[in-house]
Every structure is written in structure tokens, then in C-alpha cells.
Image: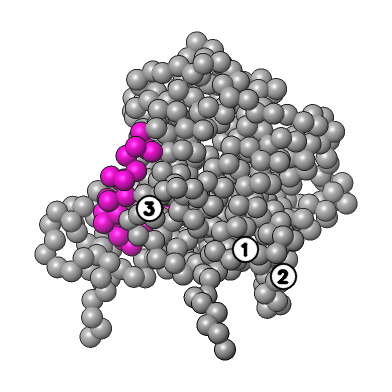
Amino acid sequence: MPDAGPRKHPVDEVLPVPKLALYGFQHVLAFYAGAVIVPILVAGQIGLSDEQLVYLINADLFTCGIASIIQALGFWRVGVRLPIVQGVTFTAVAPMIAIGQGAESATAGLLAIYGATITAGIVTLIAAPFLGRLLRFFPPLVTGTVLTIMGLILLPNALKDAAGGAGADDFGSWKHLMYAGGTLLFILAVYRMHRPFLSSIAVLLGLVGGTVVSWALGDTTFEQVGEAAWFGVTTPFHYGAPTFHIGAIIAMLLVMMVTVVETVGDAKATGEIVGKDVGDEDITRALRADGVSTFLGGVLNAFPYTCFAQNVGLVRLTGVRSRFVVVAAGLIMMVLGLFPKAAGYVASIPPDVLGGAAVAMFGMVGVVGIQTLSKVDLRQERNALVVAVSIALALLPAAAPEVFEQMPREISAILNSGITLGAISAIVLNLVFNVFARTSPPADEKAPAS
């Protein structure tokens, strides 16, 4: 028989169009709430109108689609070419609110945010080769700790949604818990059937099924679909020329430093999930994609972009490894960004149903972190201390938010994030214990079995 040649890696496999569309839509549903929550939070805090908010959401979705295609499909030396979805980083929320509230008007605040975003994107793109060479400072001890922290920080958001969503009049009622629990149990039941195809779309089936049940019982409406316009195009610099302020730029550069850790962790975790080595050059391409996407975010009236951890959990949960599924998801996002009515249907998923599915997805992010930490010799006390102290600091903003009220606003805007604090702690402590004072094998080397 003739040699068929080397077998294509599952990451590079192009699935049939129906599967690409189905799996891609599942990624969109998993990512949607996290994507739109950033413009919703920023708009509410800096005083944007409802019309401006709708535009921001559409611009965000459209740019998310472009960013995800850049990261998954790649071009030239940009994009890691793994099934990674790009979304607006939560780390930027507090700094952007501070920038917006410090401006003379809401629109002026947006222009200052966009100027800082464009600058941060350009700096990240230029510095990517250097940042890629810093991979040795992000061993499994650091990336595993950060991923575990991400799961722990994201889970409370999922549980709040499961209870009805923050601000719900009947928050915590049995009705919300029944919808969330029913969605989660349905997803688990589908997995229990051991049918590979059904398991791969279990989250999608759970979200659709939960929404349909909620609608049938009169607890979900699609009113916003009727109110939305049929078509809306995102135009560059919609609100005018961006402005550049040194304070805003410094804050956004600090945000991008944190997203470097997130991107390294997510890229390494995804590589491990799909069975593909992720080296220095891969990290450099991933960071270049972050830079290009963030630059486009400032131009197209959106925000800074990074890898979305919840979609890493979805890849782990479904076992679908093709990066072209994320390319399909990116195309779907772009369509949703052009047709507000189509996006309205996705936005109609009730928070409790979404929360039920998110419990599984966000939990899987933490599991990937724990799997990564399994490569670390935690019998060495210095390694255990890095993990323990970093997790403890990551919980500080939620446990004692008053601490950050005593800080200067610029500092509080950066540090008032569990992921930021935990990531900084893991990096610094690893440097102190394992890089600058190394007296024994590296942190990511297992001690020989006794």
C-alpha cells in the first residue's frame, strides 16, 4: 500500500461544515455572557446611554470574532493556531471604569480608553518576541496556580448567575436554583450516556433546553429581539478620534502585563488538552495575536483582548480539538455583531440557565490548573507556599474589598482583582524561591520516587 503520509494532528483537522457550525455555536454560547458583561459594566459605571451600550455590545462581538479567527487560524507569525477563543479581558474592567469616570464626559472617557487600548496593543505586538522568551519564568508552578485561581474566581460568578443573577428581585429563589440545577443535571446526564457526539455538544443542548423550558413556563421572553435593529455595522472610530493620556496608557499597559500571564497559562493549558507542545515561538505568536486584537479593539470601539479561560474549559469538557471550530465560532460572532436581532436571541438565555452550565465550564478551568500543578513537586515547601499564598491573595478582593478603598484610585484599579493579585504573587514568589535562589531542581521537575 502507498504511504498515506503523516497523519494530520486533530488540532488541524477541518471538520464537516455542520459540525463546525454546531461546535462553533456552542463556543459562542459559552463565551457570550462573559463577552457582553464587560461593556455592560463599563457603560453603567461611566454613564453611557442604552443606545451606546447596544453599539458597544455589537462592536465587541464583531471584534471578538475577528480576534478569535486571528488567534485560531493565524497568519504570518501571528496567532497560536490552537482552539482558543479571544474575548475582552476582565482585568481591564476596573481600570477602564477609572479612566472613564475621570473624564469630563462619558464619550470623552471612551475616547481615552480607546487611546490607551490602541497604545497597549501596539506595545504588546512589538514586545511579543521578548515576552515569548520569558516563558521560563512561567513554569507549571506559575501557570497551574494562575489557572486554578481563574477557576476559583470565575465560579462565584457562575453561582450568582445560577441564583438568578446579581440584582434579581428574587435572587436565590428555588425557581432559579431549579433552572440552574436542571441545566447542570441535564449536561451531566448527557455525559453519562457515553455518546461521543452528544457529549461534545452537551453544554449547547443544556443551554438551549434550559432556555426553551424557561420560555415555555413563562419565565423568559424574547422582547429584546423585537426591539433590536435588523442590521448594524461597526465603523472605526465611531465616537471620534481617540485621545492619549499617560495615566490611562500606564494603567492599560499594566492590564496587558497581566493578560500575558493569562495568555501563557491558557495557551499552555490548551496545548496540554489537545496534545500539542507549546513552545516559546507559539507563545510569541499568541501574544502577537493579543497585540493585534487589542489594537483592533481600540479602533473598532471595543476593548483589550486575551484568551478566554472558560472556552479552554469547554475544549477540555467536549474533547473537540479542531481549531477550525473556533474559526467557525469567530464567523458566527461577526454575524451576531452585524445583526443585533440575531444577537438578541443569544442574549435571551436566562442567567440561571447560563449559570448552571457555567458551573461545569468554570470548574473545568480550575481542574486544568490542578492537572498542571500535578507536574510540580508540591512536597517541596517553597512550591507549596507559592500556591498557598497566591490563592490566599487572590481571594482578598472578594473577602475584604474595603482594603482597596484605602489605596490611591490608580493602584486600586489595578490590584482590586483576584486574578491580578494571584498572578503577580505566583510570578514574584516563583522568582524569589525558584529562580533567583535556586539550590535544588527546578519547580517543574518531579522529585524521583522513593
Q: Magenta residues?
A: 123-152
Q: Position of residue 347 (x, y in %)?
A: 72, 41
- Please tell me in which quadrant of the rendered image residue 376 appears: bottom left
Vertical relation: 171 (above or below) 303: below
Residue pictured at 63% horizontal, 32% vertical? 59
Q: Position of residue 62 (x, y in %)?
A: 63, 37
Query: Is residue 133 part of the magenta span, yes or no?
Result: yes
Residue pictured at 83% horizontal, 55% vertical? 213
Residue 34 seen:
yes
Disc assigned to residue 14: 1
Judged from the image, the secondary structure of the residue bearing numbered disc 3 is helix
Q: Nearer the viewer, mark 2 or mark 1?
A: 1
Q: Amino acid at mark 1?
A: Val
- Which quadrant holds the N terminus? bottom right
- Residue closest to the far bottom: 1
Q: Position of residue 352 (x, y in %)?
A: 70, 50
Q: Amino acid at mark 2?
A: Leu
Most foreground residue, 3 or 194: 3
Mark 2 crowdedness (10 Å alpha carbons): few <14, some 14-19, many ≥20? some
Image-based side of 415 in relation to 334, left or right: left
Is the C-beta separation of discs 2 and 1 under 8 Å?
no
